[in-house]
Amino acid sequence: MKKVYTIFFLFAWILSGCNQQAQETPKPEKPLPLAQHQATDPQRMDAAKKIARQDGRVKEATAVIIKKDLSVGLKVENFNRFFLKDIRKTVFHRLRKTYPQYQIHVTTDHKLFDSLQKMETELREQPPLNPTSAQKKLRKINTDMKG
């Protein structure tokens, strides 16, 4: 009986040693694009979201910066939906005071909020090789905002 336990233990020990060696193989890294332009600024996007959330009526915020455009989407719920215009105006003026160099667009529309949020995650995961295509998408969202 002791022999069976010893054989089982040796077999498990050999398999665990092989398993660790398989895990230690380095994974290939993603190659960095050669002509990547820094058209976005993640730190300023985070700061703009923080400024937007300072208004207590805003539940969630998303921000996208491409070149000289700053677009912010706001999620407002419940009773605060009656004050959308005032909320947009307040957030716009706070952002204008902090970032006078950008052209600022603020929306409370759910569909545009979702589009901006999707664009923000795409920009954070992998900045675009061609910033003009991202700028065209943002320009389309901004024209839908009418502002």
Image (cartoon, rainbow, N blue to C red):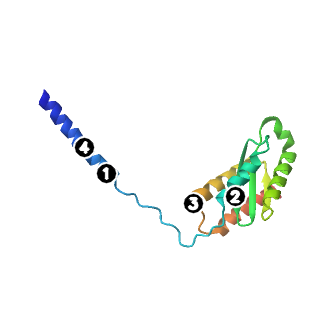
2 or 3: tag closer to the N-terminus: 2
Which residue is depicted at the point 81% across and 62% down? 100
3 or 1: tag closer to the N-terminus: 1
Q: Is residue 42 above or below residue 52?
A: below
Quadrant location of the N terminus?
top left
3 or 4: tag closer to the N-terminus: 4
The circle drawn on residue 40 is: none
What's the distance in space between the residues labelled 3 and 4, CA to CA? Answer: 38 Å
Which residue is depicted at the point 53% across and 69% down? 33
4 or 2: tag closer to the N-terminus: 4
Badge 3 is on which residue? 126
The circle drawn on residue 22 is: 1
Which one is nearer the viewer's eye here, 99 or 104? 99
Which one is nearer the viewer's eye here, 84 or 112? 84
Secondary structure at numbered mark 3: loop
From the viewer's perspective, is 54 left or right of 31?
A: right
Secondary structure at numbered mark 2: helix
Type of amino acid under label 1: Ala
Task: Report crowding for label 2: few under 14, some 14 to 19, many 20 or more residues within 10 A (C-alpha).
Answer: some
Type of amino acid under label 2: Arg
Badge 4 is on which residue? 15
From the viewer's perspective, is 66 left or right of 80?
A: left
What's the distance in space between the residues labelled 2 and 1, CA to CA? Answer: 41 Å
Of circles 2 and 3, the one toward us is 2
Of circles 2 and 1, the one toward us is 2
From the viewer's perspective, is 12 left or right of 73?
A: left
